[in-house]
Image: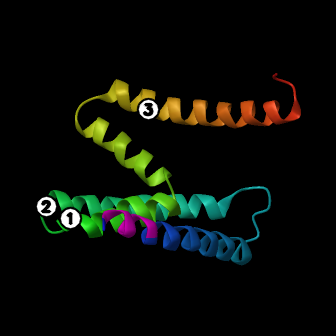
Amino acid sequence: MEWLAVAVGGMLGALGRYAVSGWVHRLTDVSGFPLGTLVVNVVGCSVLGVLMQLVEEGRFASAPWRLFIAVGLLGSFTTFSTFGYETLELLRGGDGRWAALNLLGNLLLGVGALLVGRLVVRGLIP
């Protein structure tokens, strides 16, 4: 049953990302900047922050609903929300160095991996 909660949440999150990102691009005139993605990431982080605070306070304990929202819905809406949450938890736990490494690692390695993927397809890296 847990996999179904994740799957349905994932489907709805992906559709939500597509809809919100498109809506933002239609409403704004910011060419060249991925404003839709930024909005999706900030909204996803906000929702995950609310959810995890409710869980921490014991006001939201249903495992299937947590999986549906946190893993499925927000996981496909944006993985940035998980990245933000994990970084914040490192900071809250006093692990500033790990938080900084997580920030830099995700940003630099993520962008670097995109570049390597493009270069592989172009045949520049055998």
Foreground residue among 107 and 72: 72
- Magenta span: predominant SS is helix
Graded by Cα atoms within 10 Å as few (under 14), some (14 to 19) or many (20 or more), the crowding at tag 1 reads few
Q: Hey, what amino acid is under mark 3? A: Asn
In magenta segment, residue 99: no
Q: Residue at x 66, y 61 (%)?
A: 35
Q: Quadrant of residue 3?
A: bottom left
The label number, if any, that marks residue 102 in the structure image: 3
Q: Position of residue 100 (x, y in %)?
A: 42, 29
Which amino acid type is marked by label 1?
Leu
Assign the C terminus to one quadrant of the image: top right
- Alpha carbons under labels 1 and 3: distance apart: 25 Å
Q: Residue at x 87, y 34 (%)?
A: 122
Instruction: Give percent across and percent down for residue 112.
Output: 67, 30
- From the top left corner, tell me how far across and down residue 62 is, in percent: 19, 68
Residue under circle 1? 54
Residue under numbered circle 2:
57
**Where is residue 42 shown, x and y percent of the image?**
49, 60
Report if residue 6 lies within the magenta region: yes
Span shown in magenta: 2-7
Circle 2 sits in a helix, a strand or a loop, which is it? Answer: loop
Q: Amino acid at mark 2?
A: Glu
- Return the disc, 1 or 3, that comes first in the chain's sequence: 1
* Label located before the other in sequence (3 or 2): 2
Q: Are marks 2 and 1 in contact (CB under 8 Å)?
A: yes
